[in-house]
Amino acid sequence: MKKAVWILVAAAVLVGCQTRKTSSQTTDGEGVSDSVVAVTVKYATGFSVRDSADVRLVSVGKKDRFALVRNQEVQVPEGYVKVVVPIQRTLCMTALQLSNFTVLDAHDVVKGITSTKNLFNKDIRQRVKDGRIVKIGMEGEFDTELVLAANPDVIFISPFKRGGYEPIKETGITLIPHLGYKELSPLGQAEWVKLVGMFIGKEREANAVFSGIEQRYNALKEKAAAVAQRPTVTSGEMHYGTWRAVGGKNYLAQIFRDAGADYVVNDDETAGENLEFEKMYALSANADYWRILNSYPGQFDYDALKASEPRNELFKAFRERKVIYCNMKQTPYYEISPVEPDVLLKDFVAIFHPELVEKDYEGKYYRLLK
């Protein structure tokens, strides 16, 4: 009798264990497996995510569709390119893409990059030096043999830039468009870290990284929104006879607004246009601040700014020494700022409204020119 009871108890325990095990693999109302780390897109407009029990469907841009699976045998919907994740090897075509891997501590996955110009990251530089990361050439001039030798699972590309991907397409390697640079929202651009996270199996880390960025950005944005006085700001400088002015809907213009300032160009353009000096002067002559980003060799100062264009001294921001400056040869601007919009915002707030940040704060990228 006792033996029969023990058999019944053991069977009940076994059934319970099996039930719990089955339960852990069930899906929620959206069909997402409990074991899958959910990814929600809040700000980015260039990609979207839809999960089911066995496959994650990722849409990038208007036409690229990828089905991310853990098992090669899983069937995917028609029209989707199957990608087995996590990928182990990839190539990066831009600094923006590379910044995603840096913040996710995933340099091991990167096997090739296009350039080391203005590259500050010591780990990446060492990997290039010892051959763990190869330079595959610039967009439009790729070394196909180096690309193949890197043996990437996928390649992240920027399809609307210089291009030149046709030879790579012929290799059969899956190309993943990374359109973060097209985002007009600072948080939207930073959110592309989630796309990379999904491909390399670091969704949880990507969610955590972005959550921190979002919280810090929005908290400071809220403070700046309450300021009583909003200064005006212009941006850019003369190059080869024209002034490249970013549009009023540009990523940079949005950061200015979020930092409690008004950009002098108030149109619906995004990329902007090349303007003659007289046109830009009419817009910017009385701007309170003037933002400049360049790669000046040596120490950039007001004398250098005047030497580049004598009429620059006519601007109010020049006369009152309120030029905001970042030298890409001295700061990792393009290398890491795409995943630090909160830091960029703080740099500008510290200049426009210093009372909103700690007294000893020093800008990481932007400071008033001396």
Image (cartoon, helix red, strand yellow):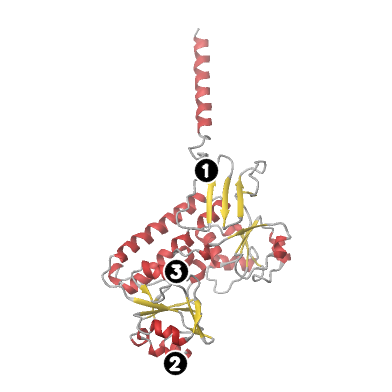
Name the kind of residue labelled 2 in the image.
Pro
Query: Alpha-carbon distance for marks 2 and 3?
Result: 30 Å
Looking at the image, the residue that sits furthest to the front is 268
How many numbered tags mark residues here? 3
Picture coordinates of residue 96, whole percent (x, y) = 53, 65
Read off the residue under disc 2: 310
In the image, which is nearer the foreground, mark 2 or mark 3? 3
Does dot 3 land on a helix, a strand or a loop?
loop
Query: Alpha-carbon distance for marks 1 and 3?
Result: 36 Å
Does dot 1 land on a helix, a strand or a loop?
loop
How many other residues sit within 10 Å of disc 3, few (<14), some (14-19) or many (≥20)?
some
Whether residue 107 is visible, yes or no, is yes
The earlier-in-sequence mark between 1 and 3 is 1
Does dot 2 land on a helix, a strand or a loop?
helix
Which mark is drawn over residue 249? 3
**Is residue 66 depicted above or below 92 in this figure?**
above
Read off the residue under disc 1: 36
Picture coordinates of residue 50, whole percent (x, y) = 53, 47
Picture coordinates of residue 234, whole percent (x, y) = 40, 78
Name the kind of residue labelled 3 in the image.
Lys
In the image, which is nearer the foreground, mark 1 or mark 2? 2
Which residue is at 70% across, 61% downward?
Answer: 169
Picture coordinates of residue 181, whole percent (x, y) = 52, 65
